[in-house]
Structures are given as C-alpha cells and as structure tokens.
Image (spheres, rainbow, N blue to C red):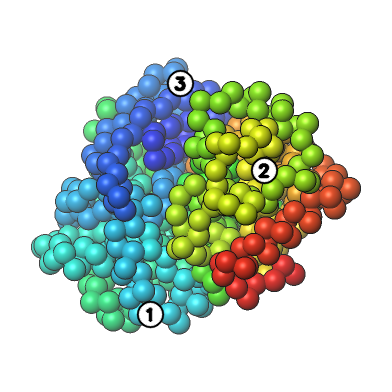
C-alpha cells in the first residue's frame, strides 16, 4: 500500500492505494480555522490530531496489508514558529493570510536579484513576509524559535523528532531552488538569523520512519518510511499524472490553479508565475493560482439548482454572452497581479441578481474559461511549454458541459482522471521515491477516465469574446504591457 495525506484548508484526507492505483481505503477529518479580515489562522496541534485520527481509521481498513511509504502535502505558504523540539509557539498562518502584505515590498527589494533569477516576485501572502511580521513583533528573539511549514508538524509527529522541510513548501519562505540553500545575503539584509530556518531536502527524500508512538496512535506499521512531500498544487499535478514536459493540470475548485512541466525555468517579470523543482529529473513545475474560479459560481448563485442552470446554459449561445471577469473578492494574483482588481459583468459590476439567470451563469463559466486561456498565454510568454495535453481536476471537473467549454476555449486535448486528488499525488510520490522512478509510479497509479477533444470551429467562435476580456482588463491597467503571443 502507498499512502498519501493531504492537509487542506477545510479537512485532512488520507488515502491508501495499491500498486495499480486502486483505492483500498480513505478517511477524512475536518479542520477549522479563524478568519479576521486579512488574518487566517489554524491551530497547528489540530493538524496532527486530525491526521492521526484519519490515519487510524485508514489503517483499520487495510487488514494488515504492508505499507511501502507515505508522504504529506499541505497548503503553500502556511507557516508557524516552533521551539527547538518542534512544539508550536504560534498559530499556523495560512496560505492566504495577508497580515504581512505591507512587508512584501521589503522582502522583494532585499532579494530582487535572486527572485528575478528564480523567475518570480515576492507576493503579500507568501511565507517570507510573514517571517518579517514575526520579526517586527519581536517573536524571533524568543530563544530557540524555528520556522516550520504546515506538513513539517505532521511529519515530525510521525517520526518522533523535528524534520527537514521539503524545498517545495520552502519556496515561499525564500529558499533558493537553484542554489539549493537559504540565501544568507538576502536574510542578512532582512535581519533574519539563518539559524531560525530548517534544513531543506528535495521532495521524495526520506525524512525518517514512523516511530513507535505514532505507530500506536495511527495503526501504521512501525518503521514505515515517511517521504518529504510537496505543496498541494504540485501534489494535485502528480495525482493527475501530468509529469511530462508540456503537460498541465488545471485544478478548478474554489479557485483556478495551473501546474505544468517545463524543461526550462520560466521567468515572468510580473510575478504571476512561479516554479517548483520537479522531484525527478532536471525539470521545473511552473504555474500559478488565480483568485477566480468555481467559487464565483457558488457565491453568485447561492441556493440555485446548478444542474438545472447548467442545462439551461447549454442552450445559450455562449459566443454572445456579456464579457465577464468572475472575481468575487478583491485583488488578483494570476494570470496577472493586481491588488485593485474587481470583478465585472458587461459594462457594470459583477451582479447577477437582475439579469437572465441562464445567460449570466453561462457568462460566469465562460469568464473562468477566458481566464484559464489567458493564464496559458501568460505561461507561454514566460517561456513555459504549453503544448498539452491538459488534465482537468477539482470539483468543477464534475460538470461535463463546463469541461467541454473549457476544452474548446483552450483548443487543447483534455484528460479527466478517475481519482483526481492531491492525496493520490502523495501516494504517487511515496511509491516513486521508494522504487526510484516517480513518472513510472504515476503511470501505474494514475488512471484516465476519459479524454476530450477540442472543437476548432467553436474555438474560433469563442475567441472574439476572449479578446474582449483581454481588452477590458488591459483598459483597466491590470494587463498593461502584455500581449497574447
């Protein structure tokens, strides 16, 4: 058995699959957080408590079958401070906690040359600005304090001692993925003691083995290897089987996240694109996460029968609906960075309360498809290979009409996997790390349910609407200087 654990925002999920990718057991437990304006926290102790409960249920369903290894993924940019023994000293500041947003400029300036070399810009909700916030609050002067990332808490509990961070989760803390080190000169400018930062290893490295206490708590076999994981976006990519150059995974859940594979390190001067190192070969995993997505449908059409709306939208001529930028919150991070971005429908605000419901639903769904196409354009301009195919995952991938609309908009072949979730990606990583071939493990464990082919004629009919959205975003100053090449 290969086990993957996914620490999400709302739950922790554990999955066990056999060596042919068949799900043998799964379990989940809820996670709860606290939100207050720009702040979003969770209790780090709950990460291990809920994970241990899920693993105990999972183990009880395995019937004593041997476990080869497990790996853990978590949200990107979620960090906390611990003591020397790994005991949490602060709440976990979540991936979208932007309390330190004003310090992102300091972090960007201190490491501008390095960040440019790595192909990104420091963003407000990333982990390094949060570390500066703790610095200014005086918490880094507390004796023996250490920075830790969300999965480090669970991995440390599993092996019985503090563990190294993986370079995927460490990216947003300022780790140099090319030099494979913490950048001492940048840290000195930021008045950060390098001793506060964890050792870093590549994803797929062995962090340790399940200790006796964790074995007793979870039911996992004592001595099971614990493998360094990756962020949830990368985990979803592995679980989708997008591991070859030019292949992409588009996760359409509350937000839209794209992750792909490139033979070169893409560089985007706007900072919307950033890249992880692949856990195999000399490849890069570029991508980004938009603030738009299927969450707009849930927010704008609360209480609606979405299946009925989809059937009605399928009868609408989507080439003639109003142009829509489906952003329900404030600010965008991908495919462009604009803190002042606001959603719109036609010439007005994003308001669907008075119009034709089927038309407006189609416009919102089409708007997400437009943003997805724009994202691929930005990725191509940054140097990434976007030849495809694309794998669709996330909750919205259960909507066949929307899937085909997105496929036609992109003009790319689309694969729909049978088990699209980050926990499977961590099972793939665990299996590949032990057997020595991660792509081969993905080919064994990931199953494609079906494939969609784009309609070129429909793509041509949809392109003018896409161009209208690009023009509208450019007119507002959010896409200044960008051209779709």
Helix or strand or loop: what does disc 3 sit on?
Answer: loop
Give the mark, 2 or 1, whose residue is nearer the N terminus. 1
Q: Which residue is mark 3?
A: 62
Q: Residue at x 27, y 47 (%)?
A: 36
Which residue matches tag 2?
363
Write the residue at 75% across / 39% down: 404
Residue 410 can be seen, yes or no? yes
Q: Position of residue 439 (x, y in %)?
A: 64, 48
Query: Going by the picture, which residue comes out furthest to the front?
Result: 354
C-alpha distance separating marks 3 and 2: 46 Å
The disc at residue 109 is: 1
The percent coordinates of residue 230 (x first, y second) are 46, 51
Distance of label 1 from label 3 (alpha carbons): 51 Å
Q: Are marks 2 and 1 in contact (CB under 8 Å)?
A: no
* Residue drawn at point x = 62 percent, y = 54 percent: 347
Quarter-of-image position of residue 134: bottom left
Q: Is residue 390 left or right of residue 210?
A: right
Q: Nearer the viewer, mark 2 or mark 1?
A: 2
Tag 1 secondary structure: helix
Residue nearest the observer in this picture, 364 or 214? 364
User: Could you tell me if the residues under marks 1 and 3 are in contact, i.e. CB atoms within 8 Å?
Assistant: no
Task: Decide which of tag 3 and tag 2 comes sooner along the chain.
Answer: 3
Give the mark count. Answer: 3
Q: Residue at x 47, y 71 (%)?
A: 121
Q: Is residue 362 left or right of residue 229?
A: right
- Asked whether 240 or 325 is in front, the reply is 325
Q: Measured from the top left, where is residue 129 in percent x and y?
A: 32, 66
Left or right of 419 on screen, residue 93: left
Of the image marks 1 and 3, the number of the one nearer the N terminus: 3
Would you say residue 266 is visible in this rendering?
A: no
Of badges 3 and 2, the one in the foreground is 2
């Amino acid at each position: 058995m290969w086990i993957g654990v996914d620490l999400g925002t709302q739950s922790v999920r554990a999955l066990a699959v056999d060596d042919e990718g068949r799900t043998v057991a799964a379990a989940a437990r809820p996670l709860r957080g606290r939100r207050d304006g720009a702040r979003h926290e969770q209790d780090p102790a709950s990460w291990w408590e809920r994970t241990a409960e899920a693993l105990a249920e999972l183990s009880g369903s395995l019937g004593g079958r041997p476990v080869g290894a497990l790996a853990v993924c978590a949200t990107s940019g979620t960090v906390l401070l611990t003591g020397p023994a790994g005991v949490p000293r602060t709440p976990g500041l979540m991936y979208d906690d932007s309390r330190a947003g004003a310090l992102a400029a300091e972090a960007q300036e201190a490491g501008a040359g390095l960040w440019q070399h790595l192909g990104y810009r420091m963003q407000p909700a990333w982990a390094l600005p949060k570390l500066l916030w703790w610095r200014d609050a005086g918490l880094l002067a507390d004796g023996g304090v250490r920075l830790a990332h969300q999965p480090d808490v669970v991995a440390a509990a599993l092996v019985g001692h503090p563990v190294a961070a993986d370079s995927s989760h460490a990216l947003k803390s300022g780790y140099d993925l090319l030099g494979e080190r913490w950048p001492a000169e940048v840290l000195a400018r930021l008045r950060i003691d390098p001793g506060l930062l964890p050792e870093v290893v590549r994803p797929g490295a062995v962090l340790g083995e399940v200790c006796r206490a964790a074995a007793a708590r979870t039911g996992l076999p004592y001595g099971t290897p614990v493998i360094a994981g990756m962020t949830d976006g990368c985990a979803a990519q592995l679980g989708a089987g997008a591991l070859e150059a030019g292949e992409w995974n588009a996760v359409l859940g509350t937000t839209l996240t794209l992750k792909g594979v490139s033979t070169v390190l893409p560089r985007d001067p706007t900072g919307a694109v950033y890249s992880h190192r692949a856990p195999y070969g000399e490849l890069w995993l570029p991508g980004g996460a938009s603030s738009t997505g299927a969450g707009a449908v849930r927010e704008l059409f609360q209480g609606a029968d979405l299946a009925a709306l989809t059937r009605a939208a399928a009868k609408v001529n989507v080439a003639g609906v109003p142009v829509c930028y489906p952003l329900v919150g404030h600010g965008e991070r991908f495919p462009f960075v604009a803190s002042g971005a606001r959603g719109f429908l036609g010439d007005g605000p994003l308001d669907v309360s008075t119009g034709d419901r089927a038309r407006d639903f189609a416009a919102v769904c089409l708007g997400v498809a437009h943003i997805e196409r724009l994202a691929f354009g930005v990725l191509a301009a940054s140097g990434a290979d976007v030849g495809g195919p694309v794998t669709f995952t996330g909750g919205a991938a259960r909507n066949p009409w929307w899937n085909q609309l997105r496929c036609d908009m992109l003009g790319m072949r689309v694969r729909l996997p049978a088990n699209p979730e980050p926990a499977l990606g961590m099972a793939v990583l665990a299996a590949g790390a032990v057997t020595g071939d991660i792509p081969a493990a993905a080919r064994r464990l990931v199953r494609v349910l079906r494939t969609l082919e784009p309609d070129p004629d429909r793509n041509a009919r949809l392109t003018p609407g896409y161009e209208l959205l690009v023009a509208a975003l450019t007119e507002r100053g959010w896409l200044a200087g960008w051209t779709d090449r």
